[in-house]
Image: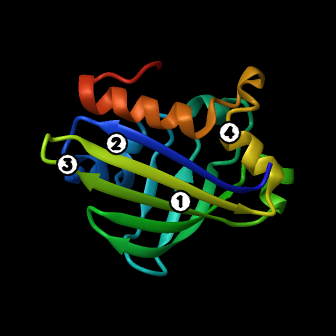
């Protein structure tokens, strides 16, 4: 599975709060794969996603994801490159491209759209589509985004 994947979720939170949850290590450590993601929010800035303690205990590398900020327009749009380092085969597929688009409505609900341009990265595509969930690799983007929604709306992530 390669090409482009698009995921959209509606979150009852201001765009500024959703942006903060996506871009700050304090928030990113609380949902999804629960590894803090550090971003230098300027074009050319580094993106470093660290493995969580459970991943480290299973032998994962300290840095699980890396990339570079391509475009930043807080709190509306973030474009970055993305490479998963947890698996040598997926890492060898190289960098993919992520775009986060946030649109806040008048009702205090933010529409968050994540577009993952995979190019020729079929294993990354299968991972992010949740195909390896039974193997303990999480449920991909759908799982990450619903966990983010739960955290922002209720103060609690779905698991962990």
Badge 3: few (under 14), some or many (20 or more) residues near its Cα, within 10 Å? some
Residue neighbourhood size for the residue with mark 4, other residues' Cα within 10 Å, grouped as few (<14), some (14–19), many (≥20): some
Which one is earlier in the sequence, the residue at label 3 or at label 2? 2
The image position of residue 159, as x and y in percent, is 47, 18
The numbered mark, 3 or 4, whose residue comes first in the sequence reads: 3
Location of residue 76 by image quarter: bottom left
Q: Position of residue 145 (x, y in %)?
A: 46, 37
Seen in the picture, residue 78 relative to 90 is either above or below; the reply is: below
Mark 3 vs mark 4, foreground winner is 3
- Say above or below: 69 vs 92: below
**Could you say whether the residue bearing mark 2 is in a helix, strand or loop?**
helix
Q: Nearer the viewer, mark 1 or mark 3?
A: 3
Q: Are marks 2 and 4 in contact (CB under 8 Å)?
A: no
Residue farthest right in this picture = 89
Marks 3/4 in contact by CB < 8 Å: the verdict is no
Q: Measured along the vertical axis of the image, is residue 60 above or below residue 147?
A: below
Name the residue that disc number 3 marks: 105
Mark 2 vs mark 4, foreground winner is 4
Q: Which residue is mark 1?
A: 48
In the image, 53: left or right of 22? Answer: right
Contact check, label 4 and label 1, Cβ < 8 Å = no
Kindly identify which numbered label has been placed on residue 129: 4
- In the rendered structure, the answer to whether residue 60 lies left or right of residue 32 reads right
Q: Would residue 31 be seen by someone viewing this image from the given angle?
A: no
Name the residue at the bottom extreme. 44
């Amino acid at each position: 599975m390669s090409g482009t994947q698009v995921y959209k979720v509606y979150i009852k939170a201001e765009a500024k709060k959703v942006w903060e949850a996506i871009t700050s290590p304090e928030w990113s450590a609380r949902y999804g794969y629960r590894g803090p993601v550090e971003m230098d929010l300027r074009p050319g800035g580094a993106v470093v996603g660290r493995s969580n303690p459970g991943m480290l205990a299973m032998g994962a590398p300290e840095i699980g994801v890396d990339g570079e900020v391509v475009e930043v327009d807080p709190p509306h749009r973030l474009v970055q490159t993305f490479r998963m380092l947890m698996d040598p085969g997926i890492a060898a597929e190289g960098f993919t491209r992520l775009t986060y688009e946030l649109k806040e409505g008048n009702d205090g609900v933010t529409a968050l759209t994540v577009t993952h341009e995979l190019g020729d990265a079929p294993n990354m595509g299968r991972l992010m589509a949740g195909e390896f969930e039974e193997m303990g690799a999480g449920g991909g983007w759908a799982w990450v985004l619903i966990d983010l929604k739960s955290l922002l709306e209720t103060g609690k992530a779905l698991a962990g």
